[in-house]
Image (cartoon, rainbow, N blue to C red):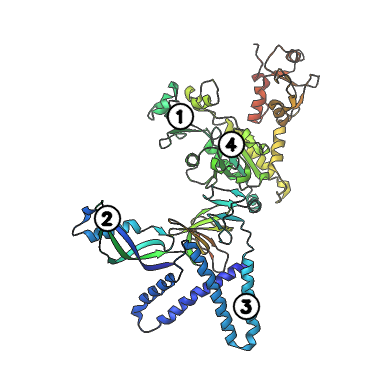
Amino acid sequence: MFFHIVLERNMQLHPRHFGRELREKLVSKLMKDVEGTCSGRHGFVVAITGIEDIGKGIIRDGTGFVTFPVKYLCVVFRPFKGEILEATVTMVNKMGFFAEAGPVQIFVSNHVKIQKDSEVRLKIIGTRVNATEIFCIGTIKDDFLGVISDPAGS
Amino acid sequence: MEFHNGENKISCSKKYNWLFKMSVVDVAPLNSSNSDDFAAFLDTELESTPNTSPEPEEDADETHHSDINRTKRQKIEVMESDSAANESTSQHETTLAVDASVKKNICTHPSGMLGLCTKCGEKWDNQSGVRLEYIHKDVWVSDDEAARIRERDLKNLLRHKKLYLVLDLDHTLLNSTHFIDGDATQEEGYLMNPSDPMQDPLRGSLFKLNSMQMMTKLRPFVHTFLKEANKLFEMYIYTMGERAYALEMANLLDPGKVYFESRVITRSDCTREHKKDLDVVLGQESAVLILDDTEEVWDKRKENLILMERYHFFASSLKQFKHRCKSLSELKSDESEADGTLATVLQVLKKIHTMFFDPDLGENFSGQDVRQILGTVRSQILKGCKIVFSHIFPIDFKAENHKLWKMAERLGATCAKEVDPSVTHVISTDVATAKSRWAVHQKKFLVEPRWLEAANYLWQRQPEDRFPVNKI
């Protein structure tokens, strides 16, 4: 599921970036640092959509780096148990198949006749989240689930 | 499973419940605030999950359970408020819901991946059964489930008239060497220079892998072999090499990824050190053929094994096996494309495949066993030969246990310790022994042991005059 939420992060900036463009530098560094990462609690950060607030910077002792608390708006993607997703099959093996919905990898066991590159609608029945990755177990054994388009396009 | 699904439905319906509520709110005339409302609602939903627990996974679980309870309560409330007549149904509903939570625990967790059961999605950290690293970095399959997968897969495969074929890499399909440690001999120097005209005949089968500092020569005929074998077999690579190396080789052999897909098994998958076994191959043993140049690693599966003559292209490879002769690279020659080892073996494979899918059996091949067929084919090679060995076995060695004795028997020959008129061959390395002289006198075949080995590798009785015993 996608969420549009406000997150906060302390950004450290090198003094050479201080000047008129400081804010732009902060924002571009934030995008580089945060977009595409994954946190267990919020899921994948898909895109930053705006900056809520940039707090007062604090100079770090000894280094000259300055830490700014930044509040930003972003779109996150977090799969949940019971959620229905559409995903692309990436690998089929004897145990089942792997599918990807954006950055999330989902494994579905005991398939029948699933081809690589086809699109499936599946339901998530288990999730495992760590600092950098979300892995899900899914099923296609339920009403309205299963292959929705073949790679051949027929 | 069904009950579990049912329960998920309940939790889903709860989720949609609030979505539904949302849309009811949204019908209010102020459309502009829609998105804000929604975001705010999601925020509160997110905030409502307990913040204290360090494991987010557990958060999700907890909310999930409380969801169920809430739904149950809601359901009961609704039912009760309806009318007294419906009371029996409401009770029925509750028992069903309770049943669901009991039944849910029944999943046997047949296989797990990254700490989750792949069947029900529950947390499951029990690492028992067999580990299949080549499928995913952390997969466990219980023995029962593996047996079930094998059975199902075999049925499917037999319907396509295919069998399993497990292929070794080094010395079977190709030969590799490191090129930095000065292993290359002077005569091999031309291999280092890509523009050397000597390399022309090797184009397309000699590869230099700079990232691994290796040079690889594919065995002649290998492309045709794979193409033909792919029609009859589902193929695995099974090597004692490193995973990165194996994948690189698989890429050379199968750039289109049509033959092996993810079926590349490497050293890290092996369940016993320095041994290969079929437990990690999800194929029924009665339908697996193995091509390998090393017999020892397959000690449990010799009946499935077709032993291959080692392919040595590079000098360093010969040195590794302590052979003192010129390598193919030094002689600037190669195995024959048309009747080399791979071509011979392909014929054998085709023969076994035809015998397995005997048209007389109709469509029922479940009683067939490749091990039996392989044994039958093999025992035809030297059928009718009676062999006596002379000066081959060390004194005090039990002749029946010797490698050559066993090999001769596997090839269908009968072995004897003493000469008699029914003997057809005497195998010796020395013309001067009593038995050798008897053979010459009685006009029996006198051959050296290589005759037996050649028949074993080439799957055919070899002309005896090509293996004479020389005077010392």
Residue linked to disc 1:
B201
- Pointer 2 indicates a residue of which chain? A
Whether A121 is drawn above or below B186: the answer is: below
Q: Find out whether the residues at labels 2 and 4 contact each other: C-beta distance under 8 Å.
A: no
- Pointer 1 indicates a residue of which chain? B
Q: Find out whether the residues at labels 1 and 3 contact each other: C-beta distance under 8 Å.
A: no
Cα distance, mark 3 to mark 2? 62 Å
Residue linked to disc 4:
B274
Q: Is residue B253 visible?
A: no
On the image, the x and y values in percent for residue B88 come to: 66, 83
Task: Give the quarter of the image for residue B78.
Answer: bottom right
Residue linked to disc 2:
A60
Q: Quadrant of the C terminus of chain B?
A: top right
Residue in front for this viewpoint, A3 or B368: A3
Disc number lying in front (2 or 4): 2
Task: Give the quarter of the image for residue B391.
Answer: top right
